[in-house]
Amino acid sequence: MPENLTPNPEAGAPRGKREGKVSNYKIEHFVAPISETPLQGVDAVKETGKPLSMWAEAWRSLRKRPLFIISSILIVAIIVVAALPNLFTSVDPTHCVLENSNGPAVSGHPMGYNFQGCDIYSRAIYGTRASLMVGVFTTILTVLLGTTIGALAGYYGGWLDAVLARLGDVFFALPLILGAIIMMQLPVFRDNKSPWTVIVTLAVFGWPQIARIARGAVIEVRNADFVTASRALGLSRFKALLRHVVPNSLAPIIVVSTVNLGVYIVAEATLSFIGVGLPPDIMSWGNDIASAQTQLRSNPMVLMWPALFLSVTVLSFIMLGDAVRDALDPKARKGA
Amino acid sequence: MISFVLKRFLQLIPVFIGATLLVYFLVFATPGDPIAALSGGKPMSPAVEDALRAQYNLDKPFWVQYGLYLKNLFTFDLGMSFSGQEVKDLLARAFPVTARLAVIAMAIEAVFGIIFGVIAGMRKGKIFDSTVLVLSLLVIAVPTFVLGFVLQVVVGVQLGWAKPTVSGQATWGELILPGLVLGLVSFAYVLRLTRTSVIENKTADYVRTATAKGLSRPRVITVHILRNSLIPVVTYLGADLGALMGGAIVTEGIFNVPGIGNLLFKAIRFGETPTVVAIVGVLVIIFVVANLVVDMLYALLDPRIRYA
């Protein structure tokens, strides 16, 4: 204890040999009794209840962001359209009358007709499901695959890390579209064309990106004190990974995956456009854009409408990813 | 430094073997008999067919085929395409075209992306920043092929500023429009990366020191802020080179550019194993070398990074 803070003999018990020297000091000068402290109310720290988790804190800052509000409204709307397309149009998208080929917009058909005489608006509405499905399930698959592999590599390190990192490099070195084109030529895929073949193909070439991010995040977290503590409390190494390391490494993965969802929707459209994606009988924006390209000069709107639907969807997910990143990153939050 | 480069080169070998093996397997498993296709579906005399199969090693099992391919690769013999052309010649013709295309795309995304990113970052929250951010989001959200078609029709056909399709020579001038389309999406990413990085660095202590020393603002921006902000951007550009080559398939298709993407697409369609694997091999090499160069650039940009 510093000398000038030792209590004076009147106030407290006598302390050792030097008590005479400090007798002039009154402790009241320095610390007021707690009942007289005016700051009590302000300084009080809530001791009951849990502190807000990182996620709760992120959610608090997230729900106030206009970017988040706009993008989530759009995404909810898109999900509703995908789930219940018949709520938004009563026109049968497969009912095509050649007489209407490239026809202009008329009442009840706000976007006109395509080359085959099908209603463009109705086709765009019904096309939402396939496109969204590819985006959502590809993202889920890449996250599952990438997080598992990346977390194992980062957590255990050593030869496992070396092998998994090289394996990821092999897939990473093949550009997404290029790898997907080759893979879609496989008999299993070519004969059973469906959204699922596209999902699996995109996931096969998409996971290394997530794995790299997961690996980096896990390496950052694995030596944190709370992990050491959980191990000291007797948790096995693997359980510590599952319960403490992975949940605390998820933030960057979620951010990248949200943006990726949009990227995969574009990738599906690109593959369908090249002619190796979804089968032509499945309605999707990519297929509609692909079939519109021959009509581009005479009736560009046939291409523009599905492209608009596609772009708005992708934009929503990119904006959501941006908002989530800002909310999860305390550095960015401080600056905002 | 030399041991670092050597180590990275050794790491390149399994990646290269893995990627070519993967592609070789995928193309191998693809149905369709290229030999039967050669005769246009008409029956061929068994002797001729057997001879052709033996010539292309198609009569051997997968591992032997792949082994022979690798052996030939190291003697720079890329094999013959099924239509009887040397794959080497096909590559030699198509590669310079795609290289020009990639150079234009890279130049656009690097130069404009970094300049716009720095301006936006230095003026965070101002009108220029918000406009550029919104525009970059739009560019990312619109698929490349839609962008390609729109620019082809508007710039190429309606305004007549550029040729809508590319001739066999594929000169620099003709490739500006396709290069722009190819580089536009990455341009948006580079811009956003640069912007974030500049915002992070512009309040750093060394920037304040530089300003306090009395250095001019352009010098502070270019030498102190920009140089320290470039590492994530350069990383992205390195990885993007591979994606550019893949994206070239779409762009070259739209503008009819006689490059690697076009060649590759046709080769995949016709089951031309030697051509596909040769092109993919080259692309993988480019990708890995680009990333190696990026790793070495780190040390140049940030003297604190040293390779022991």
Image (cartoon, coloured by chain):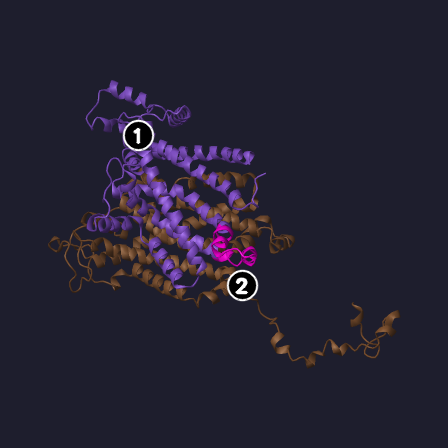
Chain colours: A brown, B purple
Q: Position of residue B35 (x, y in %)?
A: 26, 26
Assess whether residue B204 is covered by the magenta stretch. yes
Neighbor class of circle 2 (other Cα within 10 Å; few <14, some 14-19, many 20+) is few
- Marks 1 and 2 sit apart, C-alpha to C-alpha, by 59 Å
In-front residue for pair A275/B223:
B223
Q: Same subunit under labels 1 and 2?
A: no
In-front residue for pair A24/A111:
A24
Neighbor class of circle 1 (other Cα within 10 Å; few <14, some 14-19, many 20+) is some
The residue wearing badge 1 is B90
Q: Is residue B88 above or below residue A113?
A: above
Q: Is residue B76 left or right of residue A149?
A: left
Foreground mark, 1 or 2? 1
Secondary structure, mark 1, is helix
Residue ID at (33%, 31%) = B91
In-front residue for pair A192/B133:
B133
* Mark 1 vs 2: CB contact within 8 A: no
Q: Which span is picked out in magenta?
A: B199-226
Q: Quadrant of the N terminus of chain B?
A: top right
